[in-house]
Image: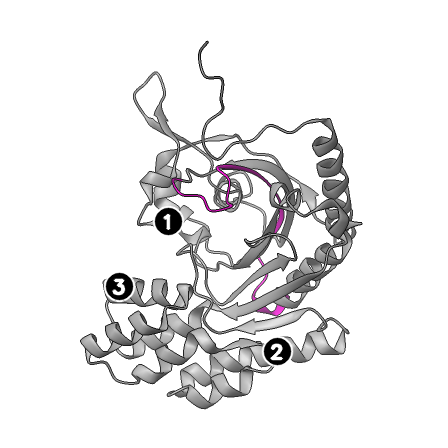
Amino acid sequence: MNDIRIPQGMRDLIPADCVRKEELRNRIEKVFMQYGYEKIETPEIEYYETYRTAFGKMQDEEMYRFFDPNGETLTLRVDMTVPIARVCATRYINASGPFRFRYCADVFKVRHTFAGKRSQVTDCGIELIGSDSSSDIEVLKCALEVMDSIGFSYQLEIGNSDFFRRACRLLGIDDKDMSALAELIDRKDLPQLRTVTESLGMDHADFFEQLPLLNGSGVIDRAEEISFSKELKQEVQMLKNLKTQLNHLGCTEHLLFDFGKVPHLNYYTGLIFEGYVNGVGVGVLSGGRYDSLLKKFGRDMPACGFSVKLDYLLDVPQEVSE
């Protein structure tokens, strides 16, 4: 008898899983609707060129690619942010915004060694398009309320993707070396990070070696101390301001700040954040600001958003969630 199986990174959901997933989705979408976000849908299939426009440097091995009858390369969507940016640049070209969109849709990314991550997940998220960084507080507060609504013990880690990027630019570090440093900081590989900074003979090597350690509730002052320029201190001040605003709203109980958080997608600018729940080894919520993305589609508008990966929440042991 032939081996009956499904592709790596995929999963079947039995009825009990479907019920639990629908309950979580309803809780999350209720919060989105309270904030005035309207539902949007896009095709599961996009032109490969759309993502190449958005990302610049493509990770082709992470995409499910195939061809249409005309020979054009297609891909299963890898996220919802890029398709919604495309919609804003085309269907809403004569509208001024801001736009508040919500969605709940499957996204696909090839996981060769997925270590808890899945190749198909349901993203439930929002995009606030046409509002500058003054709206970051709205998006963060919405993310915190979403995490509250799902009922699990959680933490929300907040960073600034421009902190690391600006330091590299100030020191003239090229894209290749920047990418290598980012990977080591993200992995918190301190010995190898020191080896690389020494091999580059770079100024302010201690700045980069400190970044993986700057994670917690009280690290903002330390980040300001190691900042070697006025520009970097301004980036720290951005997070200080957000912390103050969230404190006034009574929303700091579950917050941590992580200055070693570097963007995994190259469209992020400024604010970047991830949510974690007990019982799951990967982030279940991720988002940030992406002010440069829509310009690539001919519509220069600031934007910020996040999504929750519903399927990862199904991995939380039932006794933890009750």
Tell me if 169 is positioned left or right of 200 in this view: right
Question: Badges 3 and 2: C-beta atoms under 8 Å apart?
Answer: no
Considering depth in this image, is 178 or 46 the residue closer to the camera?
178
Q: CA distance from mark 1 to mark 2?
A: 32 Å
* Residue on which the image places disc 3: 175
What residue lies at 29% left-to-right and 21% top-to-bottom? 71
Considering depth in this image, is 223 or 54 the residue closer to the camera?
223
Select label 3 or label 2 by which is in front.
2
Q: Earlier in the sequence, mark 1 or mark 2?
A: 1
Which range is magenta?
112-135
What residue lies at 60% left-to-right and 28% top-to-bottom? 12
Please identify the residue farthest to the top as the structure is shown: 1
| Residue 3 sits in quarter | top left
Question: Badges 1 and 2: C-beta atoms under 8 Å apart?
Answer: no
Select label 1 or label 2 by which is in front.
2
Q: Amino acid at mark 2?
A: Ser
Q: Which mark is residue 217?
A: 2
Q: Residues within 10 Å of mark 3 (few under 14, many from 20)?
A: few
Q: Residues within 10 Å of mark 1 (few under 14, many from 20)?
A: some
Residue 92 spot, x, y in % from top left: 56, 43
Against 130, is 74 above or below?
A: above
* Residue on which the image places disc 1: 55
Against 302, is 101 above or below?
A: above
Q: Is residue 117 magenta?
A: yes
Q: Is residue 62 magenta?
A: no
